[in-house]
């Protein structure tokens, strides 16, 4: 056992219980822990501990991985269970059943796995994601606020752009990734949350400090997307912004909204003029082999999905796409000796390949459930100060679901965690609304 593994077990068996005791004693520490739960997401490699890792494996997970985020999530859950809030604690937030179905199908797919160890990497990650989801959901209800989440994400977006600027202008990195492991992941992270900050600017009565902070965050997120030069993110970001703007104006146009939209439009035009040469170059001179490779890998994924009802096994793509397996044949893929194929560039075909069409259906049902509930939240909270959240998430989720057609990175831990934050917010809003309705009905009956 390596020293890092010993450190992990010390943190798990000593650090987590100690953190639970400390959280019980201070409301400020509770806020700090919730802030760090979100803020620690991008620091995968600096805080992660891997067991039986295979860092050269080309799959969606490369080891039995535990992150600082996971330990903080466990501490928060332990704290919430240990106090009076335990009576309201929910292990099965809205939508959890659909995730269990997806997870169960992923487990069944291992019957076709070449490597059960590699499958275990991804299954453990899914368990950790659920723990994180439960922690964010219950902590949001306990604190009765989403502000800490928004402040933490704001800090991440600003820090990320700062580091991207350093990478680009000090180290001359053409497509900087910032504090994230991959540039596309950095762009997707911004794409998912930027519309929420735009929605806050348009639909909330913010303090001067918050307005300046969240305006800066939106600007940093937009710049991140351009600097990362992720074609999928650049394509869907204007769509997300248009959705938020349209929803905000349909709720009611006023001089303040028109002024903000006008200012942002002018800034956007100036930004487009400045960034246009770089963006055009990225689209125009992208190698044809890149597009061909995406098509070939998608065809191979189709072969896998059609060959096995339960798929070829969760996180076994990196094995099954290469010889001696023949799923790549007939796709147009040219193989050289020793070459290892990459991942299919869409989470949807990746899921179909590894978990079968039934697994893809389960994934779409799970993701679609929260999209549907977010639309319902637009009407549930139409007269609430929280209206900005479903309005912003409508744009962010549309952008990310669309971008995921072109890129698999929603399965990367950083983006998977952020998706769970979004789902936890939607579930918490639904839970709040349902609780309020039940309370109102029982009050009426008493009368």
Image (cartoon, rainbow, N blue to C red):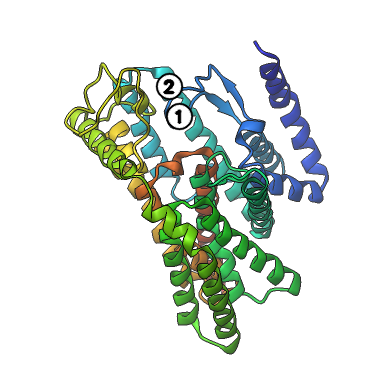
Residue under label 2, please give it: 118
Q: How many numbered discs, if any?
A: 2
Q: Disc 1 on helix, strand or loop?
A: helix
Residue under label 1, please give it: 122
Relative depth, front residue between 87 and 368: 368
Q: Disc 2 on helix, strand or loop?
A: helix
Residue 432 seen in the figure? no
Relative depth, front residue between 405 and 280: 280
Q: Give coordinates of residue 69: x percent, y percent.
A: 64, 38
Numbered circle sitting on residue 179: none
Q: Quadrant of the C terminus?
A: bottom right
* Label 1 neighbour load within 10 Å: few <14, some 14-19, many 20+: many
Marks 2 & 1, CB-CB < 8 Å contact: yes
Relative depth, front residue between 287 and 406: 287
* Cα separation between marks 2 and 1: 7 Å
The answer to which image quadrant residue 3 occupies is top right
Q: Give coordinates of residue 209: x percent, y percent.
A: 75, 70
Q: In the rendered view, does 154 fall on the left or right side of 299?
A: right
Residue 29 seen in the figure? yes
């Amino acid at each position: 056992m390596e020293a890092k593994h010993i450190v992990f077990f010390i943190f798990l068996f000593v650090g987590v219980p100690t953190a639970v005791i400390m959280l019980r004693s201070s409301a400020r520490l509770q806020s700090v822990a919730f802030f760090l739960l979100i803020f620690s997401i991008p620091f995968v490699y600096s805080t992660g501990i891997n067991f039986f890792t295979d860092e050269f494996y080309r799959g969606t997970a490369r080891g039995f991985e535990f992150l600082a985020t996971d330990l903080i999530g466990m501490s928060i859950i332990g704290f919430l269970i240990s106090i009076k809030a335990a009576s309201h604690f929910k292990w099965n937030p809205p939508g959890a059943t659909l995730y269990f179905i997806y997870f169960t199908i992923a487990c069944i797919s291992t019957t076709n796995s070449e490597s059960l160890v590699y499958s275990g990497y991804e299954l453990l990650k899914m368990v950790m994601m659920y723990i994180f989801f439960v922690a964010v959901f219950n902590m949001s209800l306990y604190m009765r606020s989403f502000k800490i989440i928004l402040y933490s994400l704001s800090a991440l977006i600003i820090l990320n752009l700062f580091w991207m600027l350093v990478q680009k202008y000090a180290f001359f990195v053409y497509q900087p990734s910032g504090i994230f492991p991959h540039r596309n992941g950095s762009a997707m992270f911004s794409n998912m949350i930027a519309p929420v900050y735009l929605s806050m600017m348009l639909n909330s009565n913010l303090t001067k400090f918050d307005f300046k902070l969240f305006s800066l965050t939106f600007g940093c997120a937009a710049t991140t997307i351009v600097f990362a030069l992720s074609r999928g993110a650049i394509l869907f970001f204007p769509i997300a912004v248009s959705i938020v703007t349209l929803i905000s104006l349909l709720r009611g146009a006023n001089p303040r909204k028109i002024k903000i939209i006008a200012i942002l439009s002018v800034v956007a035009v100036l930004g487009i003029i400045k960034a246009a040469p770089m963006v055009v170059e990225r689209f125009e001179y992208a190698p044809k082999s890149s597009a061909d490779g995406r098509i070939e890998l998608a065809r191979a994924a189709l072969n896998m999905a059609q060959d096995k009802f339960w798929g070829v096994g969760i996180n076994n793509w990196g094995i099954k796409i290469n010889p001696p397996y023949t799923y790549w044949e007939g796709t147009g893929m040219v193989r050289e000796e020793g070459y290892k194929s990459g991942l299919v560039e869409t989470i949807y075909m990746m899921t179909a390949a590894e978990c079968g069409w039934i697994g893809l259906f389960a994934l779409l049902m799970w993701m679609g459930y929260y999209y549907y509930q977010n639309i319902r939240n637009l009407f549930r909270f139409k007269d609430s100060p929280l209206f900005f959240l479903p309005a912003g998430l409508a744009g962010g989720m549309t952008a990310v679901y669309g971008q995921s057609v072109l890129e698999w990175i929603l399965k990367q831990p950083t983006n998977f965690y952020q998706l769970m934050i979004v789902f936890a917010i939607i579930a918490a809003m639904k839970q709040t609304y349902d609780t309020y309705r039940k309370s109102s009905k029982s009050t009426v009956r008493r009368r």
